[in-house]
Image (cartoon, rainbow, N blue to C red):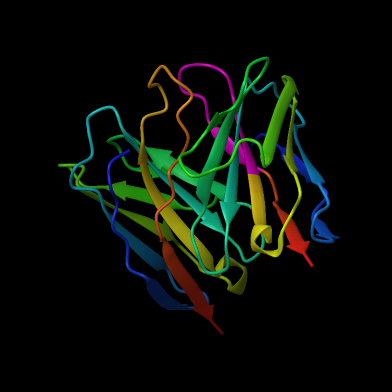
Amino acid sequence: DAKTTQPTSMDCAEGRAANLPCNHSTISGNEYVYWYRQIHSQGPQYIIHGLKNNETNEMASLIITEDRKSSTLILPHATLRDTAVYYCIAHSPSSGSARQLTFGSGTQLTVLP
Amino acid sequence: GAVVSQHPSRVICKSGTSVKIECRSLDFQATTMFWYRQFPKKSLMLMATSNEGSKATYEQGVEKDKFLINHASLTLSTLTVTSAHPEDSSFYICSARTSGSSGEQFFGPGTRLTVL
């Protein structure tokens, strides 16, 4: 998996959009960008993933730059329950072997009341 | 999304005893399951990859005789921490991968192990 770089921590006001950046300048053509989050003392929760195009689901939006070297996860209306560590992972799911997701340090997002 | 369960969610044991943690994929079959360990304020670290019907593959530095992994069926993998010591106290998380070339990976809720 390509190395990803994320800020260590970010704050966001409740109700506002949270924009979490991720750099993955060495991402290869067959690697997707995955986002997971981990609320304290829970297992990681899948959020969204994408290859080239922007993606949106009920949880978040994923914006991937045209050169695919960076991406931004957007939580449109952050709530206190969105406080968690957010992990950005570049990963190829179709590697032909049972390759696992590799977690970096992630970004601690704190949503403030 | 698919659901992965772990049991127990929390266990406290005495030093020297063995502890078994179960990981189940509830609504899908998982030929591959992964076991991670997470220390406080640290990220998840892969311990081993568990393949149904075959021996697990352990990451460098993980003792296979201490962390016994069994993946006897497509929905169940177990991790047994043998002769546990206080330094084995950690948060253990399993993950199951759906089949197919673009298999997604889903995580269990984790098991908090405290060895006294």
Q: Quick check: can you spot residue A57?
A: no
Closer to the camera in the image, B55 or B76: B55
The residue sitting at the left extreme is A67
> Which residue is located at x 37 percent, y 70 percent?
A8
> Which residue is located at x 37 percent, y 38 percent?
A50
> Which residue is located at x 67 percent, y 42 percent?
B66
Q: Where's residue A66, x and y in %?
A: 17, 42
Q: Where's residue A51, x and y in %?
A: 32, 34
Left of A68 or right of it: where is B97? right
Rendering quarter of residue B112? bottom right
In which quadrant of the rendered image does the C terminus of chain A lie? bottom right
Closer to the camera in the image, B87 or A14: B87
The residue sitting at the bottom extreme is A113
Question: Is residue B96 found inside the magenta-colored segment of the image?
Answer: yes
Left of B116 or right of it: where is A62? left
Classify B59 as above or below B92: above
Q: Quick check: can you spot residue B85?
A: yes
Closer to the camera in the image, B94 or A107: B94
Left of B64 or right of it: where is A104? left
Please state the extent of the stretch shown in magenta in the rendering.
B94-107
Q: How many marks?
A: 0
Q: Where's residue B53, x and y in %?
A: 68, 14
In which quadrant of the rendered image does the N terminus of chain A lie? top left
Classify B9 as above or below B77: below
Question: Is residue A81 found inside the magenta-colored segment of the image?
Answer: no
Q: Where's residue B22, x and y in %?
A: 78, 39
> Which residue is located at x 66 percent, y 18 percent?
B52
